[in-house]
Image (spheres, rainbow, N blue to C red):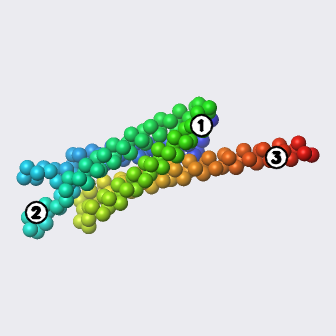
Amino acid sequence: MALDIARGFRLFCYFVVIALSIASFALIVHDLKPIINGKRYCFPHFYTTGTVGTSVSICNFGIADNVIMFVFALFTFVFVLIGSFVSSLEPHIFIFEVAVNGFNTIWAMIWAIVVSARIGGSRSKKENAVLGFSWIDFALLLFALIVTLAVERGQKGSSDDVGEADTERAEA
């Protein structure tokens, strides 16, 4: 089966998730985990009392989340691309894509909710970028999952229609 519109859309979604995972990972590691007075802070907010807010755990979770999303999106991208040219693997790739993308979608949603709740109200541009990337990743993975399921359902429906037409012709 060649590259169709739905498969192309899914590949595009996975490619963007890969790119945003790399960008978000780089922002967290380089810019959002600074060392202040010999201590590491994540999403540092300076309070009027002179203390720095938030712990390192949110950044560690963000780093792990983006690495996992990158790896899963990369594998899914490769398998969907292979499935475009090797039609005998199509059923196996569908199961793999739904399982991995379903997990990745839930994982991205958890990260988006956690980072939204943790960053707070006043944010820098870099913190806004991480926040935006997390929600964009979630939306793209969810849309890719919906398209995958819709295409599979459409293919099953069209094969059922062909079988019914053959049965009707045989009865006539």
Q: Are circles 2 and 1 on residues that touch, CB within 8 Å?
A: no
N-terminal of the pair, mark 2 or mark 1, is: 2
Residue 53, image quadrant = bottom left
Sequence-wise, the earlier of marks 3 and 2 is 2
Query: Is 128 situated left or right of 35 in this image?
Result: right
Task: Give the amino acid at mark 1.
Answer: Glu
Residue 59 visible within the image: yes
Question: Quick check: 82 above or below 57?
Answer: above
Q: Which residue extends farthest right?
A: 172
**Residue located beneath label 2 in the image:** 51
Q: Where in the figure is residue 166, as x and y percent of width and height?
A: 83, 43
What's the distance in space between the residues labelled 3 and 1, CA to CA? 24 Å
Whether residue 23 is visible here, answered yes or no, is no
Residue type at the position of mark 2? Thr
Residue bearing mark 1: 90
Q: How many residues crowd around disc 1 within 10 Å: few (fewer than 14), some, or many (20 or more)?
A: some
The image quarter in which residue 127 lies: bottom left
Marks 2/1: CA distance?
A: 56 Å
Query: Crowding near pointer 2: few (<14 within 10 Å), some, many (20+)?
Result: few
Between 19 and 108, the one lying in front of the other is: 108
Image coordinates of residue 29 in percent, x first then y, are: 23, 46
Q: Amino acid at mark 3?
A: Ala
Q: For mark 3, what is the residue?
A: 165
Estimate the x, y position of residue 26 in percent, counting from the top left: 27, 45
As drawn, 47 above or below 59: below
Which residue is at 58% across, 33% downward? Answer: 89
Give the left or right position of residue 27, taking residue 20 as reference: left
Disc number at residue 17? none
Seen at 47% across and 40% down, the residue is 76
